[in-house]
Image (spheres, rainbow, N blue to C red):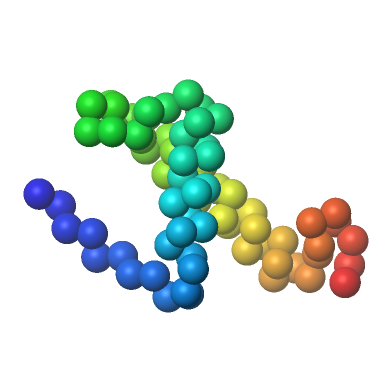
Amino acid sequence: MARNSNRVLVNGAENALDRMKYEIANEFGVNLSGDTPSRMNGSVGGEMTKRLVAFAEQSMSGMGTMGMRR
């Protein structure tokens, strides 16, 4: 069995990531469970990564959510 070696570095981030995971799964119509094919579960993780990278890029560029400089 695989062991999860990820650890949360920011307090509260784990809950936010779980909410994001289930929101994306709902958008994709994926039921996150052991019976769900890994390809479908992986699509949720891939979308989470895509959104988190976009958020980080936006944050690093100094842009707000509306595309306006702060």
Residue 35 % position (x, y): 23, 26
Quadrant showing the C terminus: bottom right
Residue 12 % position (x, y): 49, 68
Visible in this render: residue 46? no
- What residue is shown at x 52% (from left), y 48% (from top)? 20
Visible in this render: residue 28? yes
In front: 57, or 22?
A: 22
Q: Residue 8 sits in which quadrant? A: bottom left
Residue at the limit of the structure toward the left, as seen here: 1
- Judge left or right: residue 16 versus residue 9: right
**Looking at the image, is 47 positioned above or below residue 31?**
below
- What residue is shown at x 79% (from left), y 56% (from top)? 65
- Judge left or right: residue 38 versus residue 64: left
**Looking at the image, is 57 positioned above or below residue 10?**
above
Residue 62 % position (x, y): 79, 70
- What residue is shown at x 47% (from left), y 74% (from top)? 11
Residue 55 % position (x, y): 65, 58
- Judge left or right: residue 6 versus residue 23: left
